[in-house]
Amino acid sequence: MVQVIDGKQIAASVIDKVKAASAALEAQNGVKTGLAVIIVGDDPASHTYVAAKSRMAKDCGFNSVQHTLPTGTSQEELAAIVKMLNADENIHGILVQLPLPRHIISEPIIQAIRPEKDVDGLNIVNAGKLATGDLETGLVSCTPAGAMLLIRRTHGEDLSGLDAVVIGRSNLFGKPMAQLLLNANATVTVAHSRTKKLPDVCRGADILVAAVGRPEMVKADWVKRGATVIDVGINRIDAPERGEGKTRLVGDVAFTEVSEVSQSITPVPGGVGPMTIAMLMANTVIAAHRSVGRALKIF
Ligand code: GUN
């Protein structure tokens, strides 16, 4: 029987710890954890994600600030807001929702966020700490950190002898995911759209992590029997069976058929998605603790 990994439940246990940590910081140091989320433009999916992040931040007892900016916002205007938030001592985490509108060059904006407040783990300081195996003093990108927690719940801390394949090589997910797996002693392959014989590569994986953004691309015959499958995709597809104009969410993995061969698998929705928000809250309260010289371990 396949084990369906319950991301909602594991995320809820992280959120409980975040709430306790933020309450303790406020009681003992008089510091209210602050998260600022910036969104530019009117992409509906991004607005849904950002609203969920801001809501959860409030729920965790944080000072939750959202900057909602029009599509026409200039590079300089956005940079000025990041600069202001960098200097604001009530703000411990800054997240600029991606993707940004095309006329804005993302990289200088992301790199302008102070590493201590970079709760997305995208600053080169944080990316470099992860790459050199320093998991104690930096901040790790939320979705890979969340996916890793799900993998650890299945396999434990040490992945020695296990082959892991990550499909996707983005700075936000694929690269940090590969680093986390490598840190846990897995043997890691990073595959992507230019990989030759992708199904063959995937079939070698004891742990298969899919982050490609293509609905149900990973089929049962790509998956080794007994593998752990982590589905990072969130794709909205038409669902005429639910009525005219209806849609539904699916991952990058063909869930029903892959469930027949895998040992454990994350569902979409309810798998990695809730973990991303939980880890964002965790990174923010960790950053707030560090701002007063306190170390905090949540996971
Ligand atoms: N867009 C989709 N996922 C993310 C994320 O984790 N962080 C940011 N900043 N933007 C995103």
Image: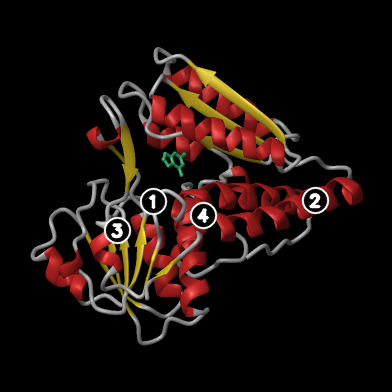
Dot 3 lies on which element?
helix
**Which residue, given by chain and number where applicable, does mark 2 sit on?**
292
Placement of 23 over or under 144, stated as above or below: above
For marks 3 and 2, give the CA distance: 45 Å
First along the sequence among labels 1 and 4? 4
* Residue at the disc numbered 3: 255
Residue 237 percent across, percent down from the top left: 26, 37
Q: Is residue 205 above or below residue 89?
A: below
Q: Few, some or many C-alpha atoms within 10 Å of disc 2 (few <14, some 14-19, many ≥20)?
A: few
Which label number is shown at residue 268? 1
Determine crowd level at label 1: few under 14, some 14-19, many 20+ residues with C-alpha closer than 10 A. Answer: many
Q: 142 or 84: which is nearer to us?
A: 142
Q: Which amino acid type corresponds to the residue marked 2 in the rendered image?
A: Val
User: What whole-number distance in Å separates the C-alpha atoms at marks 3 and 1?
Assistant: 8 Å
- SS at mark 4? helix
Measured in 3D between alpha carbons, the distance from the residue under mark 4 to the one under mark 3, in whole angstroms, is: 33 Å
Q: Which residue is depicted at the point 26% across and 65% down?
A: 258
Residue 238 can be seen in this image: no
Residue visible at 71% across and 55% down in the picture? 16
**Which one is in front, 102 or 255?**
255
Q: Position of residue 234 (x, y in %)?
A: 35, 44
Please name the residue shown 54% across and 67% down the image.
Answer: 134
Q: Residue at x 40, y 12 (%)?
A: 72
Q: Residues within 10 Å of mark 4 (few under 14, many from 20)?
A: many
Disc 4 to disc 2, C-alpha distance: 19 Å
Q: Which residue is mark 4?
A: 126
Q: CA distance from mark 1 to mark 4?
A: 29 Å
